[in-house]
Amino acid sequence: LGPCWRRQRHLLYSASTGARTEGSLCQEAEALCCQVLARGDEGFDPDALLTGTVTNVICRLVFGSSYRPGDTELETVMACINGIAETAGNSGLVDTFPWLQIFPNQKLKKLRESVRIRDELLTRKLREHQATLCPGQSRDLLDALLHDQQAVGGAGGEAGRVALTEDHVLMTAADAFGAGVETTATTLRWAIAFLLHHPEVLGVGGLGLAGAGDWMRGRLWVRG
């Protein structure tokens, strides 16, 4: 693993930690709780709410946007992530025999379309950040990557370091979604499923949630 990868990892870690990130997480968690409570006694599958909340957190970290439920752009981001997650591991024979791409393949077509839409969205966000970038101020991950790119590649840049290319910036942003959304949402779904079956855990370790298990069992159902 080369110096560019290590620098990207450092920038991604720095952009995803700190008081500002904690504040974003708390706001999104509060919004999620409000959406759940708004369902009242109605039973529902929490999958869409969990995925939407996690997607919103990653959007805040990567390009500083937060969306309300049902927002068109949020739906686009979630559709891309779901499309890639559903098809990326199912290409199978095409990975082994690339020439099979010449034959009709609906899963491969869906994967390519999802990647295309994702890349168009991230490129548009990158252009917006390039146009509004302020020296010494990093609003999110894209700003941090662009500042690093300018510090190394601009006039008087740091010697001995390779500047991040635009592809590096875009793929780092894409990786944040690829690694951050599906994995986290799946972990939360498993946590809910575990707590539904082991409500006694809610009262352990100072969680202060004793009694919440009965409420959850009456309202939430998680797909297997």
Image: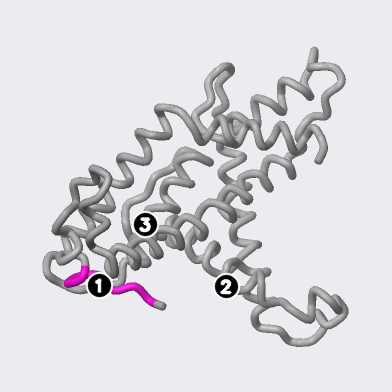
| Residue 6 to residue 57: above or below | above
* Residue at figure coordinates x 29%, y 70% from the top left: 197
Q: Amino acid at mark 1?
A: Phe
Residue 5 falls in image quadrant: top right
Decide if residue 72 is in sight here.
no
Q: Which residue is mark 3?
A: 71
Where in the figure is residue 47, as x and y percent of width and height?
37, 67
Mark 3 vs mark 1, foreground winner is 1
* Range of magenta residues: 217-223
Where in the figure is residue 200, as x and y percent of width and height?
23, 60
Q: Under tag 2, what secondary structure? A: helix
* Residue at figure coordinates x 34%, y 73% from the top left: 222
Q: Which is more N-terminal, label 1 or label 3?
A: 1
Q: Which is more N-terminal, label 2 or label 3?
A: 3
Instruction: Depth check: give the residue in front, 210 or 21.
Output: 210
Q: Which residue is mark 2?
A: 86
| Residue 149 to residue 205: above or below | above
Examine the structure image and report whether residue 23 is included in the region drawn in magenta.
no
Instruction: Depth check: give the residue in front, 202 or 193.
Output: 202
Instruction: Depth check: give the residue in front, 215 or 165.
Output: 215
Q: Are marks 3 and 2 in contact (CB under 8 Å)?
A: no
Where in the figure is residue 148, as x and y percent of width and height?
68, 26
In the image, which disc is placed on residue 44?
1
Q: Under tag 3, what secondary structure? A: loop
Please state if 213 lies on the left or on the right of 65 as rendered: left
Please state if 105 lies on the left or on the right of 218 as rendered: right
Q: Quadrant of the C terminus?
A: bottom left
- Rounded to the nearest whole Å, what is the CA distance between mark 3 and mark 1? 20 Å
Q: Amino acid at mark 3?
A: Asp
Q: Under tag 1, what secondary structure? A: loop
